[in-house]
Amino acid sequence: MESKLKSSIIICLGIIITAWILGSSFQNRNKNLDAISVIGLGTKDFVSDEILWSGSYTATNMDIKEAYNKIISDQKIVSAFFINKGFKSSEFSFGAVNFQKKYRQITIENSENQYDKKYEQIFDGYQATQSIVFVAKKNPDLMKRIELVSSKTSELINSGIELTSNTMQYTYSGLPSLKQSLIEKATKDASERANKIVKTANGTIGKLKNASMGVFQITGQGSTEEDSYGGINDTESKNKTARITVRLEYELD
């Protein structure tokens, strides 16, 4: 009799606990359903107002002093070239001269065995390298002149100098304020979307539960490139598009 009573008590407790768990799960599920999550987008096209362009040239000689002297001589020619193109000496700058030992590989063959070859590195002189850099900030005229002259550097070949041009880098000085305005735009867009959805469903939007921001991306105008993880910062395009997303989660009354 006593054992039957204990069994009944255990069964009753089991039923009560199960009912409580199911009730809690149902309640939590309803809580999750009593919310709406919406993503808003903020975009803007803009034109870069800063530019950085650089190039470099080299001189090689078995004597490091002669290599340096050649670079300094070429520097004067390069400087005169750009001044003749309408630039002031203050509108460009030269970097420090860097040196690197150059080697060439020779093959030593075995006359008795054609498959037995050895390779040896032979010192081939010192290579001196110097860069020239142009920077323009909020100066449209200087930017335009830099863009035009970058395609004419092959003329230096006539002076025996090969200037290797690097990719033009475009940036924008107003990026912080642009980002802030896009966050506001994306937030407003998300809020309007949420209100329209709830209104269409004859519901009432409640308090804001959560807000999160997506990655800030800058791409060339018309580009379909996208990176939702680390974002994109295009510096090769002059005309760009900035975009950002904001996710808002609201309670439903």
Image (cartoon, rainbow, N blue to C red):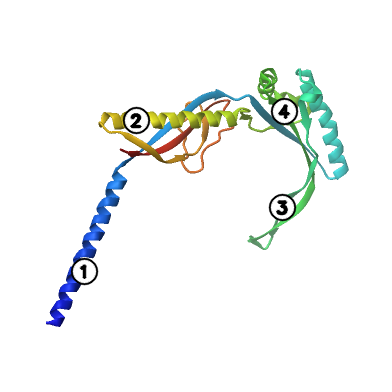
3 or 2: mark nearer the eye: 2
Amino acid type of the residue tagged 2 in the rendering:
Asn
Q: Residue at x 76, y 17 (%)?
A: 86
Disc 1 residue crowd, few under 14, some 14–19, many 20+, Cα 10 Å: few
Residue situated in front as seen by the camera: 66 or 43: 43
- Residue at 68% x, 17% y is 141
Q: CA distance from mark 1 to mark 4?
A: 81 Å
Q: Are marks 3 and 4 in contact (CB under 8 Å)?
A: no
> In the image, which is nearer the foreground, mark 2 or mark 4?
2
User: Of marks 1 and 4, which one's residue comes earlier in the chain?
Assistant: 1
Q: Position of residue 202 (x, y in %)?
A: 25, 31
Q: What residue sits right under mark 3 in the picture? A: 106
Disc number lying in front (3 or 4): 4
Q: Nearer the viewer, residue 211 or 171?
A: 211
Judged by depth in the image, the label closer to the viewer, 1 or 4, is 1
Judged from the image, the secondary structure of the residue bearing numbered disc 3 is: strand
Say if 206 sits above or below 221 in the image: below
The image quarter in which residue 253 lies? top left
- Which mark is first along the chain, 4 or 3? 3
Q: CA distance from mark 2 to mark 4?
A: 51 Å
The residue type indicated by label 1 comes to Leu
Mark 1 vs 4: CB contact within 8 A: no
**Marks 1/2: CA–CA distance:** 46 Å
Say which residue label 1 marks.
Answer: 13
**Residue with the mark numbered 2:** 195
Q: Position of residue 96 (x, y in %)?
A: 80, 39
Q: Nearer the viewer, mark 3 or mark 1?
A: 1
Using a 10 Å C-alpha cutoff, classify the residue at mark 3 as few (fewer than 14 neighbours), some (14 to 19) or many (20 or more). Answer: few
Type of the residue with mark 4: Phe
**Which quadrant of the figure contains the N terminus?**
bottom left
In the depicted view, which residue is nearer to us: 189 or 251?
Answer: 251
Distance from Cα at disc 3 to Cα at disc 1: 89 Å
